[in-house]
Amino acid sequence: MAILLLCSAYLQLNDPDAWLWVGIYGLGGVMMLMSLKYRLPVWVSLVFASACLSFALWIMLAVELVQWPAVVASLRMAGTGVEEVREVAGLAIQGAWFGFYAWYAARTDRSNAGGVM
């Protein structure tokens, strides 16, 4: 996932608001790289997942009506609505991943502490 997020950050360099998306995907990628050596605290993963999913919801509520075939027909930017739908998808993927990571970390913490699942 770290490689996917860092590649996503790189691909955002040509975006008009690149600083935002490089920061979001780059932070997620760096956090995943750090998790290879250090366990991320569950709360950090939950906060990041919540932020990504909340931002995705905020964009989704503001997006204009989009012709769905245009979202997947071409990789080119076919309008701001298409671009925003793709941004929502990226945030949702990242948020879901960090949510899963937090759930898994909490589960393994409890099982290692002798807790009952």
Image (spheres, helix red, strand yellow):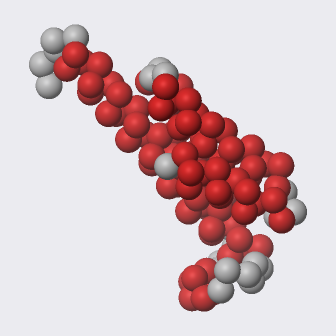
Is residue 74 depicted above or below 12 in this figure? below
Residue 90 percent location from the top left of the image: 58, 58
Q: Nearer the viewer, residue 10 or 94?
A: 10
Outermost right residue: 16
Outermost top residue: 113
Residue 110 found in image quarter: top left
Q: Is residue 53 visible?
A: no
Q: Residue at x 68, y 44 (%)?
A: 26
Q: Is residue 38 visible?
A: yes
Residue 27 percent location from the top left of the image: 66, 38
Residue 82 found in image quarter: bottom right
Is residue 110 depicted above or below 56 in this figure? above
Residue 86 percent location from the top left of the image: 63, 68
Q: Nearer the viewer, residue 111 or 38?
A: 38
Q: Residue at x 53, y 37 (%)?
A: 32
Q: Residue at x 61, y 80 (%)?
A: 71
Q: Residue at x 56, y 36 (%)?
A: 33
Is residue 89 depicted above or below 25 in this figure? below
Residue 116 relative to residue 75: left or right: left
**Quadrant (top left/top right/bottom left/bottom right) for the C terminus:** top left
Q: Nearer the viewer, residue 42 or 69?
A: 42
Is residue 21 depicted above or below 76 in this figure? above
Residue 109 found in image quarter: top left
